[in-house]
Image (cartoon, helix red, strand yellow):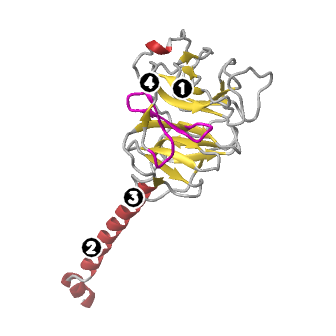
Amino acid sequence: MDSKLWSRDSLYVSWVKSPEQWGQVISIAIMKDDTILGVGIDHKLYSRAHFDTPWVKARDTCRPMAQMVKSIAATEDGAVIGVGIDNKLYTRENLDALWVKATDKGGEVKSVTIMKDGTIVGVGLDNKLCTRATLDAPWVKAPDKGGQVTDVTIMKNGSILGVGMDNKLYIRATLDEGWKSAPDMHGQVKGIACHPCGSCDVPKSKPTSAPAAVSVSASSKESKPTPASALPVATTETVSKEPAPIPDGDCCRFSFIVFIIFFFFLTCLLDLLSSPEIKDNSDL
């Protein structure tokens, strides 16, 4: 697991690694204008215009624990919904806005996506699906059809695409149906997003600049498909090979410490210069 971006033009082709890699992300979403959104390993929001452009940090606050999320989804009107590190929902009107906590109606989720009709779909802490009609409505458990997932996205045809506990892809045609294994193209992922205008359910003859599906942390390790009803309960730990960016809150704290140290030495110097011994020596 490398926390990098990979893509597949449909569910019937293999994963392809992004041509250039800058930074690492733990969750992704794709906006209607093809902008790729990512949650960095520092739990901050980033964006990249295309697959071959670097990540750019979105507007942030200086408070160290504020504005931190672990999953995101893009709405039709360009807004972003995120899951905070407290497992509650947050929203921001656009990339230039700050996160605002949504109405707390109880319940906690670890991942979120949005269906075509605006229904919010979340992955609960039990790795089961739940839904929320609007941001002002409470979470409702979806019919339990077996299987567990860690992340979900919505395909163009309305089907739900999920990442199983074995880091493989699974499909759920509707909330009332069970999970089925997606074609196994030899790769493991921990985050997934479907392009809103793309198709993940039919093969394409040529790759497009806006990939149908994007994943985080794909690997080429081969394994046999696992039925959704028997998904192993396991997690994959990501070992970061790159240092995490310093959150803005840490920068503020570092500047304050430097100021205190400078003030301490300046005080000592003034005390030394004003001591009687130095005055006597200056009279000589």
Question: Does residue 119 show up magenta in the picture?
Answer: yes
Give the x, y percent position of residue 47. 61, 46
Work out how far the residue at label 3 is from the one at label 1, CA to CA, in angstroms. Answer: 41 Å
Q: Which mark is residue 236?
A: 4
**Mark positioned earlier in the residue sequence (3 or 2):** 3
Work out how far the residue at label 2 is from the one at label 4, CA to CA, in angstroms. Answer: 53 Å
Q: Secondary structure at mark 2?
A: helix
Closest to the camera, between mark 3 and mark 2, is 3
Work out how far the residue at label 3 is from the one at label 2, CA to CA, in angstroms. Answer: 22 Å
Name the one closer to the observer, 87 or 63.
87
Q: Secondary structure at mark 1?
A: strand
**C-beta proximity under 8 Å, tags 3 and 1:** no
Does any portion of residue 25 appear in the rendered image? no
Query: Which region is colored magenta?
Result: 114-137
> Quarter-wise, where is residue 251 in the image?
bottom left
Closest to the camera, between mark 4 and mark 3, is 4
**Mark positioned earlier in the residue sequence (1 or 2):** 1
Number of labels in the image equals 4
Give the x, y percent position of residue 75. 60, 45
Does any portion of residue 228 appear in the rendered image? yes
Work out how far the residue at label 4 is from the one at label 3, CA to CA, in angstroms. Answer: 33 Å
**Crowd around label 3: few <14 · some 14–19 · many ≥20 (10 Å):** few
